[in-house]
Amino acid sequence: MKHILVLGATSAIAQAFCRARATPGARFWLMGRNEARLRIVADDLMARGAAAADVRAIEPGNFSSLKTAVEEGFRVNGRFDLFLAAQGSLPSQDLCEGDPGLLSKFFQASAVDIMQAALLVADKFEHQGDGACVILGSVAGDRGRRTNYVYGAAKSALETFCEGLRQRLEPASPVILVKPGPVDTPMTAHLQKNALFSSPEKVAVAIMSAIQRRAAVVYAPFYWRWIMMLIKILPRRLVKRLRA
Ligand SMILES: NC(=O)c1ccc[n+]([C@@H]2O[C@H](COP(=O)([O-])OP(=O)(O)OC[C@H]3O[C@@H](n4cnc5c(N)ncnc54)[C@H](OP(=O)(O)O)[C@@H]3O)[C@@H](O)[C@H]2O)c1
């Protein structure tokens, strides 16, 4: 797992994963919207021993800048062993309800860009005959909740997308949807922390383990699988009354 392509490379979870993979010979192609922040990530990976860490800034919502960056990455690196999609944001449910126009930008960054990048990568992986796709979903995609159903809707869209892409690419290329519970990162900086919060490093370990096992869907930490299993079997009538 030496050649790694990342969308949303400034994400705290992506950084924790890449730091753990920054071994001699590792080559990173880091994509995101902010070149200055991407360069800080790249410099850190180089300082840790990576052989290469290139950055490409992508204009949000601009498919041709995404396509150019992905294609250039394959041209320069020759191949990738892994595509990691970590881009995404947690919009305020209240603001979305007040101004539904906000949904376009949110869905573009948190679902559309990721699907577009994954489709570009899928063609290349089919050509290579290998390569793993890892997409960061969320437990929020398992069930709609009063407090975050816009965010959850983007994550459940990614789940359906991954299910189909998996049918297309496997067995040559695993398609792995990682569903973290709450993680202490800039995305959740405004939320009060509790015992359910995990760390980016723990999620990074779960991602690596999922790749090694060629898992399809993993919860991070693992116990979210059991929590969400219970939540998913709650009758709709009861869930309607929870409003949380
Ligand atoms: N933290 C959690 O509790 C949690 C739980 C479940 C799933 N996840 C998922 O894990 C992934 C990584 O999140 P994180 O927790 O590591 O958060 P993070 O550190 O805030 O990273 C978010 C990433 O998405 C990028 N991004 C945000 N809005 C964007 C936009 N409109 N256009 C383009 N790029 C945008 C950010 O770029 P900039 O650096 O330029 O802002 C950054 O690279 C996300 O998909 C998130 O939904 C997180």
Image: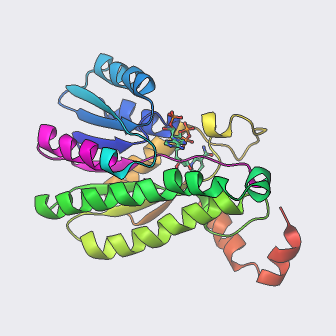
Would you say 70 lies left or right of 37 here? left
Question: In this orientation, which residue lies closer to the viewer: 223 or 211?
Answer: 211
Residue at 35% across / 42% down in the picture? 6
Question: In this orientation, which residue lies closer to the viewer: 10 or 238?
Answer: 10
Would you say 141 lies left or right of 236 here? left
Q: Quadrant of the C terminus?
A: bottom right
Residue at 59% across / 46% down in the picture? 89
Which image quadrant is residue 93 in? bottom right
Question: Which span of residues is magenta-colored?
Answer: 66-93
Q: Position of residue 109 (x, y in %)?
A: 50, 50
Q: Quadrant of ligand 1?
A: top right
Display colour scheme: rainbow
Compared to 7, does 137 lie above or below? below
Task: Tally the numbered discs.
Answer: 0
Q: Position of residue 69 (x, y in %)?
A: 27, 42
Compared to 227, does 16 lie above or below? above
Residue situated furthest top in the rendering: 47
Q: Is residue 53 magenta?
A: no
Q: Quadrant of the N terminus?
A: top left
Residue situated furthest right in the rendering: 241
Q: Position of residue 237 (x, y in %)?
A: 83, 83
Q: Can see residue 34?
A: yes
Which image quadrant is residue 198 in? top right
Q: Position of residue 87 (x, y in %)?
A: 48, 46
Residue at 36% across / 38% down in the picture? 31
Q: Can see residue 170?
A: no
Residue at 70% across / 69% down in the picture? 144
